[in-house]
Image (cartoon, coloured by chain):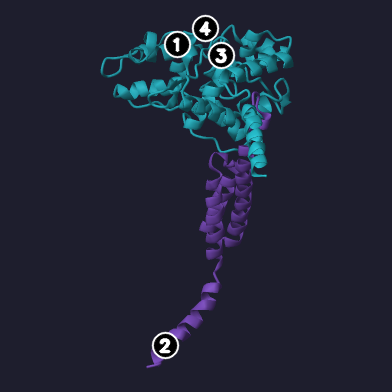
Amino acid sequence: MLKAKVILVALGAALAVPQALAGATPEEDRKETVEYFKQMFPDVPFEEFVNGQYALNDDRRKQWESMQDFPPYEFAVAEGQEMFETPFANGKTYASCFENGGIGIRQNYPYFDTEKNEVITLELAINRCRESNGEEPLKWKKGAIASISAYMASTSQGKPINIKVPDDPDALAAYQDGKEFYYSRRGQLNFSCASCHVQNPGKWIRADFLSPTLGQPSNFPVHRSKWGELGTLHRRFAGCNNNVRADPLPAQSEEYRNLEYFLTYMSNGLPVVGPATRP
Amino acid sequence: MKKPLLAIGISLALSVPLAAQAGPKEDFQEVYSKAQSTHQDAGTFQWTVTGDRLKAAKSAAGNGEYEKAIAMANEALKLAEESVAQRKQQKEVWRQVAIGN
C-alpha cells in the first residue's frame, strides 16, 4: 500500500515538473509572444510593432506622420546632447561611464549586472555616472534625465534591441519578477499591464487606443501630448498604475526595473526608434 | 489590613466600565490603525483609493469630526482588505494568463 502511494506521488511529480517548466525560458516566452501578436495582427509587419498604435490605426498614423515633420522632442534631444557633452566639475563627461562613450548603446539597456545582482536601466546608469563623478542625481521621470536618455537613444536609432538574460538564477528571478508584475492585476479597477496590452491591443479604452506589448519600450523616452514634454518609461509605468487606481511605485524601484527588463526582452530584435511621440 | 485591598478592588471595579466605554477618538484610532496596517499588508498592490480614504479619515479626525472619520477609516479598511485579497489571488493566478505560462 505504501509502495503504491510512493509510486503515485512520484508519477504526479514527474508529470507536474515538465508542466511547471514549460515556456519558462525568456527566449521561449519571447517567441510565443511574437507569434501571439503576429496571429492577432497578421497584416502588421514585425518591425512596425515599434510604432505601437500607429501601426494599428490609420487615423492616428496620419496625425503622427504629419507631426514627424517637426517632432516636438527635437529641442530636448539637442539639450540632452549638450548636457551629455558638457564636462562635470571634475572635467569628465558621461562618455567616461559608458561603453563606446555612450554612443549607440541604448539597445543593450536594461541589462542584468551579475556583480551587483540588479537590473541596470539607462536612466539608473546616467544617475550613477553623475554620482560617481561627484554630481547630484537628476530627478527620474522627466526633464534633464529624459533629455539625456533621448539623446542617447537617438544615437541608437535602427539598432535591434539586444537584451540578455544571463545564465544566472538572480537574473532569471529578476526577469520572472518583471513578468509576474506585467501579468498581475492591480488597483481597484483590477487591470494588469497585460489586460490592455496583451489581451486588448487595437481597441479603445475611453479615449486611449491600446498598443501591443511588442515594441513598447523601443520608443522611450517619449514626448506625450498629454504631458507636453518628454518622459521616461518609468513615468509611463507610474501613469498606467495610477490609471487603474493602483499606487504607483517609485521610478527606478526594483519592481519597475525588473518590469522594464522583462518588457524590453520581449522586444528583442525590434529596432530602437526612440525618442518618439505619443498622444 | 483589609482596607488597602478594598480600595484596590473598588478602584478596579470603577475603572473597568470606564475602559470599556472608549470614546469616539479611541474608536477612530482603533479602526484607523487596523486600516493602515492592512493597507501596508497589500505591499505593491496598494490601491490609491485606500490612501485617499485614510487621508480623509485623518483630516476629519483632526477637525474633531469623529463620526465622519470612523466612516472613512471603515471604508479604507474594506478597500485595504480587498487589495490584500487581490495580492493573494494574483500570486496564484497570474501564470494562467501569461504567454509562456
Disc 3 from disc 4: Cα separation: 10 Å
Give the residue at x 49% y 12%: A107
Disc 2 from disc 3: Cα separation: 81 Å
Q: Colour of chain B?
A: purple
Disc 2 from disc 4: Cα separation: 88 Å
In the image shown, does A55 or B57 lie closer to the viewer? A55
Position of B74 compared to A165: left or right?
Answer: right
Q: Chain ID for label 1?
A: A
From what the image shows, is residue A232 above or below residue A85?
Answer: below
From what the image shows, is residue B95 above or below residue A125?
Answer: below
Determine whether the residue tagged by mark 1 lies in a helix, strand or loop: loop
Determine whether the residue tagged by mark 2 lies in a helix, strand or loop: helix
Q: Are marks 2 and 3 on the same chain?
A: no
Q: Position of residue B17 (x, y in %)?
A: 54, 77
Name the residue tied to disc 1: A105
Name the residue tied to disc 4: A159
Q: Colour of chain A?
A: cyan
Point out the image quarter for the C terminus of chain A.
Answer: top right
Q: Position of residue B32 (x, y in %)?
A: 55, 56
Q: Chain ID for label 3?
A: A
- The label shown at residue B5 is 2
- Three-letter code for the amino acid on which mark 3 is drawn: Asn
Position of A244 compared to A80: left or right?
Answer: right
In the image shown, does B54 or A197 lie closer to the viewer? A197
- Three-letter code for the amino acid on which mark 1 is drawn: Ile
- Three-letter code for the amino acid on which mark 2 is drawn: Leu
Q: Chain ID for label 2?
A: B
- The label shown at residue A194 is none
Give the residue at x 49% y 10%: A154
> Is residue B64 among what the camera can see?
no
Name the residue tied to disc 3: A268
